[in-house]
Amino acid sequence: MKKTIFGFSALIIALLVLFQLSKYTYISGDISIELVIASIAIVFFVIGIYSNKRLPQQKEHTSKPVDLEKVDALGISKREYEVLVEISKGLSNREIAETLFVSESTIKTHVSNILLKLDAKRRTQAIQKAKELQIISF
Amino acid sequence: MKKTIFGFSALIIALLVLFQLSKYTYISGDISIELVIASIAIVFFVIGIYSNKRLPQQKEHTSKPVDLEKVDALGISKREYEVLVEISKGLSNREIAETLFVSESTIKTHVSNILLKLDAKRRTQAIQKAKELQIISF
DNA sequence: AATCATTTGGTACTTTAGTATGATGATTTT
DNA sequence: AAAATCATCATACTAAAGTACCAAATGATT
């Protein structure tokens, strides 16, 4: 947010400077108007690029392309996927059971199936693989 | 960000209007030079933004800011951090022991310390917390 | 020289994770 | 209607993870 304010200020100052320059040029006529316009174009082009470079953080928050088709292709069911998401949050089987209102046995069954379908030996590896496959949002 | 761009443009236009009003007192001009300049500024600003939006691959590659200062602040040692990285790769304690050429007991000690320092109950939770703290690259 | 943090490793133990197998009801598909 | 899939739960078991101690060698710091 500080960067946004800084960017705004910089832009306004740049505009003010350019207006002063244009006014001077208009009155004296020393510098050609084409040069001023070209300078303005370049300056704002650069500002535009720079202001856009501060976007990746925001983009990462908004761009979470969870490929649900891959989930289907792997034969992972809805419920299994729910469990997978909870695993990636760092929950234990018991905790997952409580959040989904089922028994721990059920979760164990789901986890085993998930590990089979993701070809993983451990839940941590399942997290890693699911992340690589863009199945879960990280 | 769309709102920001819109806000920028609106601000520039508003500035323009103000300058235009003040300028009329000085010169009884024809077509104002400020309008042209502002238009160019906006146009090239937008061009600058959109010309940069065609490079999402580079942004994803460059945006991996692993905050190693936080690792230090949490009191996590070099070796512990190495173990943490291996955990996030989905390796078991035995596998980590083999890759780092130490015994499984040592890894267990490291893992316990990591869990304490990250305030995690499980290694999966440690992965999640480390990711949130931007300690590991995901 | 003494202190401190790190790394290493051990034993003994508890807890959690994961496997194998079977079974039941519900839903969907054939 | 029969078959297949899914979600549920259970028991019994093995494997892995994690805790709680302890201890010794190393390297840096005071």
Image: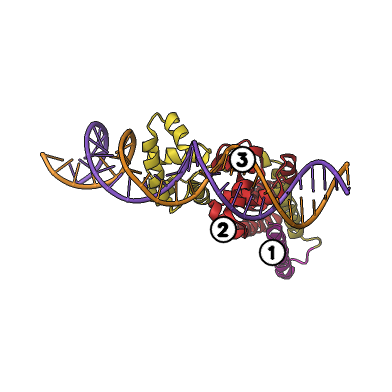
Chain colours: A red, B yellow, C orange, D purple
Crowding at dot 2, Cα within 10 Å, few <14 / some 14-19 / many 20+, comes out as few
Q: Residue A76 or B45: which is nearer the viewer?
A: A76
CA gap between label 1 and label 2 equals 15 Å
Q: Quadrant of residue B30?
A: bottom right
Measuring from the top left, give residue C8's x and y in whole percent. Answer: 33, 33
Q: Position of residue A36 (x, y in %)?
A: 69, 49
Front: mark 3 or 2: 3
Mark 1 belongs to which amino acid?
A: Leu
Which amino acid type is marked by label 3?
A: Leu
Pick the residue in front: A12 or B73.
B73
Whether residue A94 is visible to the viewer of this picture, yes or no, is yes
Examine the residues drawn in magenta and state their main secondary structure.
helix
Position of the N terminus of chain B, as image quadrant, is bottom right
Name the residue beneath numbered marker 2. Answer: A6
| Residue A23 x/y as whole percent | 68, 58
Q: Which residue is mark 1?
A: B11
Above/below status of B83 relative to B31: above
| Whether residue A37 can be seen here | no
Mark 3 / mark 2, whichever is N-terminal: 2
Marks 3 and 2 close (CB-CB < 8 Å): no
The x, y position of residue D22, in whole percent, is 24, 44
Q: Residue at x 68, y 59 (%)?
A: B4
Observer-nearest of C30 and B99: C30
Q: Secondary structure at mark 2?
A: helix
Q: In the image, what residue type sits under mark 2?
A: Phe
Number of callouts: 3
Of circles 1 and 3, which is in front? Answer: 3
Q: Chain of mark 1?
A: B
CB within 8 Å, label 1 to label 2: no
Please give the residue where the numbered disc 3 appears in the rendered image: A115
Residue range of the region highlighted in magenta in the rendering: B1-29
